[in-house]
Image: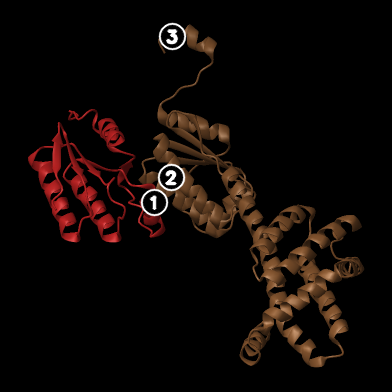
Chain colours: A brown, B red
Amino acid sequence: MKIAKDQSLDIQEVVPGSTAELLRQLVAHLRQNRTDLREEWARRITQAKLLTAMNDEEIFAEATSVYDNYVEALETGTFEALQAYARNLSERIIPRGVQTDEVVGIVLLLRDVLARSLFAKYQADFNLLNRILDAYEPAANRIANTVAVGFVQERERIIRQQQDAIRELSTPVLQVRERLLILPIIGVMDPQRARQLTEQLLHGIRANRARVVVIDITGVAAIDSHVANHLVQTVEASRLLGATVIVTGLSPEIAQTLVNIGVDLGKMNTVGDLQGGIEEAERLLGYKVVPLAQAETTPQD
Amino acid sequence: MPVPILKQSQYLIATIQSALNDADLLELRDALVGKVGSLRSRGVIVDVTALDVLDSFASRTVRDLAYMIRLRGAETVIVGIQPEVAFAMVQLGITLEDVATALDLEEGLAYLDRKTRHGQRVL
């Protein structure tokens, strides 16, 4: 890229005003040979075993659109249309499992195919060929860059979207009774998720005016010492908000981790399973759950 | 800015309304410890809802205040710690152990009622 930039600077100094003219010539050549070059390109794509997720007709159809957009970007020098097209293309092909290297690969192939055709056309006049390439290379590089960046950005957008979705789903704070929240944690606990969970819990305590919280970690297979510490901090922070935390469903491995990092178990209120935890929480809140029949026979209770 | 201390039957309520400097905090501590005796209060509520920072000095002062008031024969409860503040404190290792905390003023009053049997002196 750097070299290309320097060359384009040279052009402007040595032969000012001619770059545009050369580009026009170039674009006319590419328009004229559209069919041949496009077919050559599609053939090279298949040969290089790129875009294996798509069949030949699809490749040819996309190749045509990319080719036209490419020539247009060369002609106008503006990249907005190409950018939009790249984004649109990425949206369509990413779900089909097309990889970044394939996209970069096909754009570089097109660049190569077109450059070869320029060599063939201008091979008689080396000076002219040189100047044509000076005009072509920077624009072609920018196009390749634009398409690749568009593809990667689209991928990143999808990844971000999915991360957000997982994050939203992963930590529900549920109210089971007045003043009683449960927080069932399932899956892998990483530091980021632990932090987010704490945040949601503390806000949940405030919003629901909770006095007791049951954190159920039956669905967590193992935690590292960092997350274990975080859990303890969550318990302490909840206490500062005036809520008691009961942790339920500790697996033997997690119990071992907690002991190994030297957690003061006096501060942790733990009960074997979720049922036991909720019963304990009800006791703390002053509830007494009895079968209906028993409640009817002793109404004064 | 001094913190107003309100007397509500057997309890004292101090609502901190803006960030306090160290001198103000000490003044609040001394005023509360003094008034617990002179007004024969059974409980003290310190409301920190308006604070978005509780640094180590403030935390220590609050803890000392609670210990001192316990020695004077009354209960203290800290109410209204914000979620962010709570987590920041815990990360700094400030857990206000042995100091009662409650969600808000209402919960704090309920806690004192339970602790002191509705403000009545137990004979």
User: Which amino acid does the dot numbered 1 rest on?
Assistant: Glu
Q: CA distance from mark 1 to mark 2?
A: 8 Å
**What subunit carries mark 2?**
A
**In this rendering, is residue B100 above or below A139?**
above
Where residue A125 appears, as percent x and y from the top left, is: 83, 91
Specify the amino acid type for callout 3.
Answer: Pro
| Residue density around tag 1, few if under 14, some if 14–19, many if 20 or more, within 10 Å | some
Tell me where residue A2 appears, x and y as whole percent.
65, 84
Q: Which mark is residue B84?
A: 1
Residue B17: give x, y in percent of width and height.
Answer: 21, 47
Query: Which residue occupies the foreground of this view, B40 or A51?
Result: A51
The residue that label 2 is drawn on is: A202
Dividing the picture into quarters, in which one does residue A80 lie?
Answer: bottom right
Are circles 1 and 2 on residues that touch, CB within 8 Å? yes
Q: Is residue A60 left or right of residue A98?
A: right
Q: Where does label 3 land, which residue?
A: A299
Q: Secondary structure at mark 2?
A: helix
Judging from the image, mark 1 belongs to the subunit labelled B
Q: Is residue A20 visible in the rendered structure shown here?
A: yes
Relative placement, left or right, of A90 versus B121 is: right
Which residue appears farthest toward the left when viewing the image? B38
